[in-house]
Amino acid sequence: MTEAGQPARGRPAVVDPDLVEAARILRGALVRVHPSFRFEERLATRLGAAAVALAPDDVGDAHPWPDPIPFRGPDGFDHGARVASPASSSPAEGRRWRPTVVSPNLVRLPRGALIGGAIASGVSLAGAAFLARRWRSRPSRSPFARAARAAHRAASDRARAVRGGMA
Amino acid sequence: MFGRTRTEPERRPPGGADVDRAAVAAAKRHPQRFAVLYRKYLPQVYSFAFYELGNHHDAEDLTERVFLSALSALPRFEERGVGASTFRVWLFRIARNAISNQRRALARRREAPAALAEHLPSEIDPDRLTLRNEEHGQAWRAVARLPADRRRAIILRFVEEMSTAEIAAIMGRSEGAVRVLIHRALRSVARDLGRGSAS
């Protein structure tokens, strides 16, 4: 056998068992090392931004980046405006990447989510006030609480009487 | 776009070049599709960088530069023939060049003799990698002591499971030269493990 592991001409290939054993150990020892998830995602984000900068115009139209806030136009369709590339400072890049919102069709934006949230918020406030009132008017089961309320009421009556006398 | 598509690292099946070809063509048309190639080859490139440079910080730095370079240079990539000019070989050639540059930069920055760069992989701490037993630790140390070209050939063969043709294309050597490198590396490792006679 030659040094390069090739069988000499005319002889059967005989592999050195020590080398076979070394290869077996290396196969088990040399495992693939995986990067951290954090690094993987950070680099993915960076590559995504670089890919945006590299994408040609028609590609961007065919595959718009998903907008975190989709806009619904008067025609009822979502007009997802693409996120502007960070590298869009030059005029050429600016032509390639439109700013986020600009279409005149999108002036009157329905804001269902916000209105719904306001209604929900108002209902919550009204409910909280109703419950507080009920809790306040209900006689307490605790004698200590009842005594405290009676003392508070008496103090209030006294103060009201004093204010009336002074007037 | 670059969202996580799978969680388990994937061992590359032989003959996966056809899948790469479609992914590369898609990424050339739509750079956002590069995500598929990124997810597939990230563990491989990172492993290669880690074994070559010896620590996670430098490996991350290098991996980032390799993928950014690959993304920007992808339109110029052309697959010619089979085996030796696949996307994987091309990517690893970028990694190899980046490693060479990084080693030179490290040697300058640390104001140490260039020979220090040859010993960087010895910084790999076998204990931190939860090796299963002492035998594996000895194997790590034996690989770390190899000359750079033999170590690179061994890593590409055993970690990345590459063919001789692929390794030759990445290292810029003939297939015969790669066989010699691997053979000598195995002999050195066997000697260090106490399983071979000194050559």
Image (spheres, grey):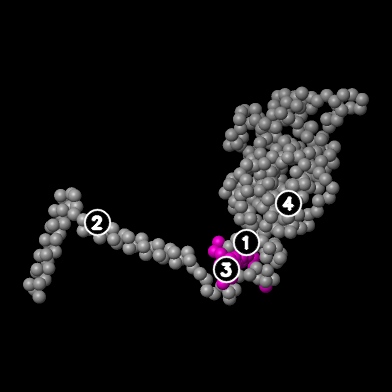
> According to the image, label 4 marks what residue?
B23
Q: Position of residue B196 (x, y in %)?
A: 75, 24
Report if residue A87 lies within the magenta region: yes
Q: Main secondary structure of the magenta part?
A: loop
Residue at 34% from the left image edge and 62% from the top image edge? A125
Amino acid type at circle 2 is: Trp
**Which callout, 3 or 2, points to the residue nearer the camera?**
3
Instruction: Tell me, for residue A65, which label it has, or none.
Output: 1
Closer to viewer: mark 1 or mark 3: 3
- Stretch in magenta: A68-91
> Which label was assigned to residue A135?
2
Question: Residue A158: horizontal and vertical position, in percent?
Answer: 10, 65
Mark 3 lies on residue: A76
Q: Residue A13, how many percent across, how many down?
A: 85, 25
In this view, B117 is above or below A153: above
Which residue sits furthest left? Answer: A165
Alpha-carbon span between mark 1 and mark 3: 20 Å
**Callout 3 secondary element:** loop
Indicate the amino acid at tag 1. Trp
Give the amino acid at mark 3. Gly
